[in-house]
Image: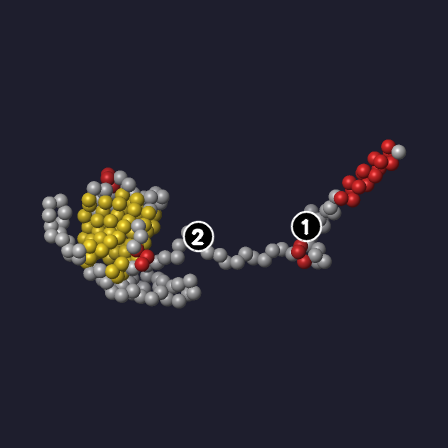
Amino acid sequence: MVRQRLASVILASLLVVPPAAAQDGEGRPVSDPDFPDDKPPADPPDIKLEGEYRGVVPGKTQVDDKGRPVKRPKNGTLAWVGFIGEGGTAKIFLQAPNEFAFSQHVEGRTIVVHLEGLKRLGRQVRRPLYTQHFGTPVEKITVKKVGARKARKGKPGRKAGIEVRIQLERAADAREAAARTQLEADGYFYLYLDVAPGSNASP
């Protein structure tokens, strides 16, 4: 009786073990044509990951998600503020549909860039740009419209325009940025600013 019960337990165990997957001569699994679920999965859809850069590339026509050219803003608009961290240097660019003049000075640990010939802010530039995690001296960039002001002690005079404030992490790195302007192939005018730790890199 004991032997009969033991044989029954062994037989039941064998019945519940799933069959091994079919393999070829080298031990690789072989798909069974009778089971469509055994087919390899289809390629995943093209999904744009969060954080993927969809912004402006200087010189290249900007398009929307449907591949259509983005509508050009009115003259006098600061359309985009771009930032790239490269080798410890902050490479910043300001984009507008028309040429503009600029000047800069340092206040504490902030580089203040004044833009003349611009009076509007594009929707994309109204919020602060936080850059403290990119390994450069720049901590934050803010943009605002400003009115005209006469020179006074400690502050230079200015015409009405737009003020870009580049806040640095350390006062020791505060000095005017290396700057240049360029009319690019996309028809936009750009101001490029390089801010390096301790000294400015050439543009």
Discs 1/2, front: 2
Residue bearing mark 2: 50
On the picture, is 46 further left or further right than 23?
A: left
The residue that appears at 30% across and 50% down in the rendered structure is: 128
**Residue 184, label in figure:** none
Residue identifier under label 1 = 29
State whether residue 43 appears in this view.
yes
Q: Position of residue 1 (x, y in %)?
A: 89, 33
Q: Amino acid at mark 2?
A: Glu
Q: Position of residue 31 (x, y in %)?
A: 68, 54
| Of the pair 32 and 141, the residue shown nearer to us | 141
At numbered mark 2, what does the secondary structure look like: helix, strand or loop? loop
Classify mark 1: helix, strand or loop.
loop
Q: Residues within 10 Å of mark 2 (few under 14, many from 20)?
A: few
Above or below, 158 relative to 64: above
| Residue 12 position within the rendered picture, expressed as x and y whole percent measured from the top left | 80, 41
Amino acid on which the number 1 mark rests in the picture? Pro
Disc nearer the start of the sequence (1/2): 1
**Residue found 67% across the figure and 54% down from its top:** 38
- Can you say whether 21 is above or below 64 in the image? above
In whole angstroms, how far apart are the C-alphas of marks 1 and 2? 36 Å
Residue name at image x 24 percent, y 39 percent: 171
From this viewpoint, which residue is outermost toward the top? 2
Dots 1, 2 in contact, CB < 8 A: no
Residue in the foreground of this view, choosing between 31 and 158: 158
Residue that appears at 81% across and 38% down: 9
> Which residue, as the protein is rendered here, is positioned at the far right?
1
Near mark 1 (Cα within 10 A), the count class, few <14, some 14-19 or many ≥20, is: few
Q: Answer yes or no: is residue 101 visible.
A: no
Q: Is residue 189 left or right of residue 147?
A: right
